[in-house]
């Protein structure tokens, strides 16, 4: 029994061991299989993630590349535009330089001709004086010989001498006439220049350069909000009614009106001043005021034309031409007021015509109307000389006036000397220093001198020339200059500028003293 029990126990023990070994083997094999599957899944996930990341990366690279290409294209377009503008500006500068060089050559040639003419006149005068002296000496000798040889009385000798002198004088006179005629041809240009210079001297006037903006003063900055209106409706209505740009910025107690058309800008200025004075600013009121101002200015244009005719002593012009003359007040040419320019040309033409013996009334009439074509609607195409030619011809002006208007820029052939006088007067008025655009170098130099003069005073920190040299702003050092000294400084700078500089119009001197105290809250 015991031996059987032992055997059973041994067998059981062996079975248990075998079961354990078999279980461990099976478990180990299944674990390896699970680990392998997990590794495969992990690798699959990694591969998918890698593919997805590469796809996303590719898309982002494409997006970045497209954006870069777009920015590059915009930059290239902007660069090309600026290059084109620069090239155009360079061409303009080259053209101006060539024009100046040609003018300089013409002036040089004229100076040479004048010098040669002066030399000829001097030589001829010396020769004349010498001949005159020789003639007096010969006459004296002849008188003595006649008295000795012929035994003539003094009276007889004088008579014979007079006859000889008359004969000689006739011969000399004929020769002198020929020489004078030849010399007159040489002196023609010189005389023309003399007449031109005399006309300029007698017609020297002040002038001002027109601006493209007008400034309307307001009592306080609260009015700016009323001008703008709710959601900007007032300012939009005003701009639509007048055709000008209204600039409401940080400028204290001022509103700026900007437009190239001076008539529209004047309408806008007067209308805005009336609206501010009235206080009622809304779209309906704006349209009403603008319409009234336009009618008033139309009447003012006609009055201006009539006053101009009275000023020049002219009459008999058609009423439509009178209106066109009035419109010149609100037109400009190269920065020069057209009406002032036309009046100046009329005076110059009249003076030169009087010197040469032509009809002064016709000359002034032609000079006044020479640029009337510039007042015609700007939508009408064509040279202003031909437009003016058609206009004055339509209203039955004198043929000489019609021809002068059409030919002053050589668009048609000149038929009368007055046309040439109008052309010369137009060139004189436009080329007079300061009348139109001045050379860049002289302009920059004038601004630099203006700033230098203002900065030469004690206590001045900075100076700025603004408004094309019409104003200089002087910033002083607040710790060295008080308010009383600032007033005196402005009064001292102004006469200094008057003494040391030459300039058109007037220059405003503004002295600014600013004290700033700064603190930081932490």
Image (cartoon, rainbow, N blue to C red):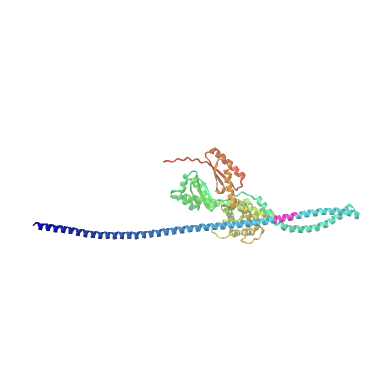
Q: Is residue 377 visible?
A: no
Q: How many marks?
A: 0
Of residues 361 and 446, the one nearer the viewer is 446
Of residues 10 and 318, the one nearer the viewer is 10
506 in relation to 104, above or below:
above
In the rendered image, residue 149, in percent from the top left (x then y), is placed at: 90, 55
Q: Dividing the image into 4 quarters, which one contains the N terminus? A: bottom left
Magenta stretch holds residue 118: yes
Residue 148 occupies quadrant: bottom right
Q: Dividing the image into 4 quarters, which one contains the C terminus? A: top left
**Main secondary structure type of the part rendered in magenta:** helix
In the rendered image, residue 277, in percent from the top left (x then y), is placed at: 50, 45
In the rendered image, residue 419, in percent from the top left (x then y), is placed at: 64, 58
Q: Which residues are magenta?
A: 113-122
Residue 414 occupies quadrant: bottom right
Seen in the image, is 72 located left or right of residue 462?
left
Of all residues, the one furthest to the left in this rendering is 1
Magenta stretch holds residue 338: no
In the rendered image, residue 183, in percent from the top left (x then y), is placed at: 74, 57
Q: Is residue 302 visible?
A: yes
């Amino acid at each position: 029994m015991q031996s059987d029990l032992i055997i059973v126990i041994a067998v059981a023990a062996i079975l248990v061991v075998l079961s354990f070994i078999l279980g461990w083997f099976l478990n180990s094999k299944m674990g390896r299989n699970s680990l392998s599957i997990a590794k495969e899944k992990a690798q699959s996930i990694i591969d998918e993630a890698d593919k997805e990341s590469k796809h996303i990366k590719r898309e982002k690279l494409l997006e970045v590349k497209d954006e870069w290409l777009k920015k590059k294209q915009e930059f290239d377009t902007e660069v090309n535009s600026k290059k084109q503008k620069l090239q155009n500006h360079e061409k303009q500068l080259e053209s101006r330089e060539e024009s100046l060089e040609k003018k300089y050559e013409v002036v040089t040639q004229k100076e040479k001709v004048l010098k040669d003419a002066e030399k000829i006149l001097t030589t001829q005068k010396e020769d004349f004086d010498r001949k005159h002296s020789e003639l007096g000496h010969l006459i004296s000798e002849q008188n003595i010989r006649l008295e000795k040889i012929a035994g003539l009385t003094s009276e007889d000798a004088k008579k014979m001498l007079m006859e000889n002198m008359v004969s000689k004088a006739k011969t000399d006179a004929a020769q002198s006439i020929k020489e004078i005629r030849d010399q007159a041809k040489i002196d023609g240009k010189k005389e023309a220049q003399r007449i031109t210079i005399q006309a300029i001297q007698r017609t020297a006037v002040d002038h001002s350069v027109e601006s493209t903006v007008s400034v309307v003063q307001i009592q306080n900055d609260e009015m700016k909000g009323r001008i703008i209106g709710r959601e900007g409706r007032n300012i939009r209505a005003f701009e639509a009614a007048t055709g000008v740009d209204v600039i409401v910025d940080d400028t204290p107690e001022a509103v700026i009106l900007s437009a190239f058309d001076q008539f529209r800008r004047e309408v806008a200025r007067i209308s805005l001043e009336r609206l501010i004075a009235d206080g009622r600013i809304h779209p309906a009121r704006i349209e009403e005021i603008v319409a009234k101002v336009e009618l008033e200015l139309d009447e003012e244009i006609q009055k201006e034309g009539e006053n101009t005719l009275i000023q020049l002593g002219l009459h008999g012009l058609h009423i439509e031409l009178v209106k066109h003359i009035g419109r010149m007040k609100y037109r400009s040419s190269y920065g020069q007021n057209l009406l002032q320019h036309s009046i100046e040309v009329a005076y110059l033409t009249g003076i030169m015509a009087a010197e040469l013996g032509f009809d002064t009334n016709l000359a002034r009439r032609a000079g006044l109307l020479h640029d009337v074509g510039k007042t015609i609607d700007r939508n009408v195409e064509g040279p202003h000389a031909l437009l003016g030619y058609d206009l004055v011809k339509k209203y039955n002006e004198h043929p000489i006036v019609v021809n002068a208007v059409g030919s002053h820029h050589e668009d048609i052939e000149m038929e009368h000397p007055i046309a040439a006088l109008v052309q010369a007067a137009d060139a004189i008025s436009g080329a007079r220093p300061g009348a139109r655009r001045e050379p860049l170098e002289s302009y920059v130099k004038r601004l630099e001198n203006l700033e230098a003069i203002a900065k030469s005073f004690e206590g001045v920190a900075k100076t700025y020339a603004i408004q094309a040299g019409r104003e200089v702003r002087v910033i002083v050092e607040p710790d060295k200059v008080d308010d009383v000294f600032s007033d005196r400084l402005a009064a001292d700078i102004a006469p200094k500028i008057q003494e040391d500089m030459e300039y058109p119009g007037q220059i405003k001197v503004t002295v600014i003293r600013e004290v700033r105290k700064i603190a930081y809250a932490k």
